[in-house]
Amino acid sequence: MSWEGALTNPDDVYPGFVRGEMANIVKRTLKAGATVPLTFIGVGMTAVVFESRGRAWKTARHADSSTNREWIEDEAEYLAAVTKVPAIARHFPRLYRYHPHEVVIEREIIMGPSKSLYRGGSGYVDTNALAEKIEKAMSALGWGHPEPKEDSVRLRENGTPVFVNAGMAPRFGRNLLDYAHEVARGKRARPKSISDLAWAIRADVMGISRFPVQTSKSEAKAAIEALAKLDPRARKHARDLSD
């Protein structure tokens, strides 16, 4: 079956260059457990979203890209983390499963209207205010808020605003250090820039970022030194880090 034959709306796939990627994307989506017919919902920088069996399937556009995999894995981890914070869990789609081999997030589908403040007018959600509320609640777990952008927020049937895109949420504190050590041990996809990750650790522990300092300088230094085994350029960010 062609990828067009697997979709209810193949003519809606846009922009055009994504059409050349669709055969592999659809194949991985089906392998993760979705069934035909799929309905194309949309595409972003990192993933394509489909509907199948009353669920949303967010599939990485490039499974062989470590950066693409990193972003999808982070979003899946974030969706899992919000379940530990009941006060804000209702503002995110339920995560059913992450399929690491196919790089697919299987989650609740929210098809309500987009209510981002960016669209203006009365009755719209202040996306930035909601993001700040989420970050305050998630800070104990070492997570910031997802990127608040146009069309990020849709409404449930009961009117609850939901961040349907939970990507680009920054880590900090212990969560950031644990992540760095797992990258250094090869247990996570390697980010695009090891040096940038090391800088983020330095900024975090020095209080340069917007997040509260949760770890010691010696712990930060140890994490950066571990990363420097992958990229020696990271070591410069460990300078002067001592308690």
Image: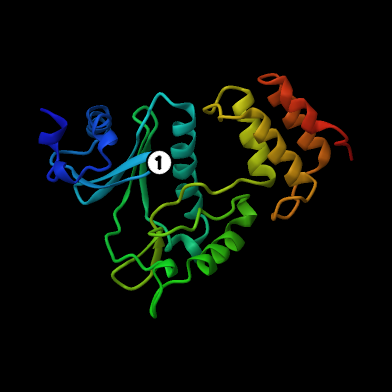
Amino acid bearing label 1: Met
**Where does residue 239 sit, x and y in percent of width and height?**
85, 32
Residue in the image at 61% along x and 35% along y: 179
Q: Quadrant of the C terminus?
A: top right
- Whether residue 58 sits left or right of residue 19 in the image: it is right
Q: Is residue 59 above or below residue 143?
A: above
**Where does residue 60 sit, x and y in percent of width and height?**
36, 35
- Whether residue 222 sits left or right of residue 113 in the image: it is right
Q: Is residue 187 above or below residue 157?
A: above
> Splitting the image into 4 quarters, where does residue 91 fall?
bottom left
Q: Nearer the viewer, residue 171 or 94?
A: 171
> Splitting the image into 4 quarters, where does residue 106 fall?
top left
Residue in the image at 49% along x and 54% along y: 82
**Where does residue 143 sit, x and y in percent of width and height?**
59, 51
Q: Quadrant of the N terminus?
A: top left
**Where does residue 112 sit, x and y in percent of width and height?**
28, 65
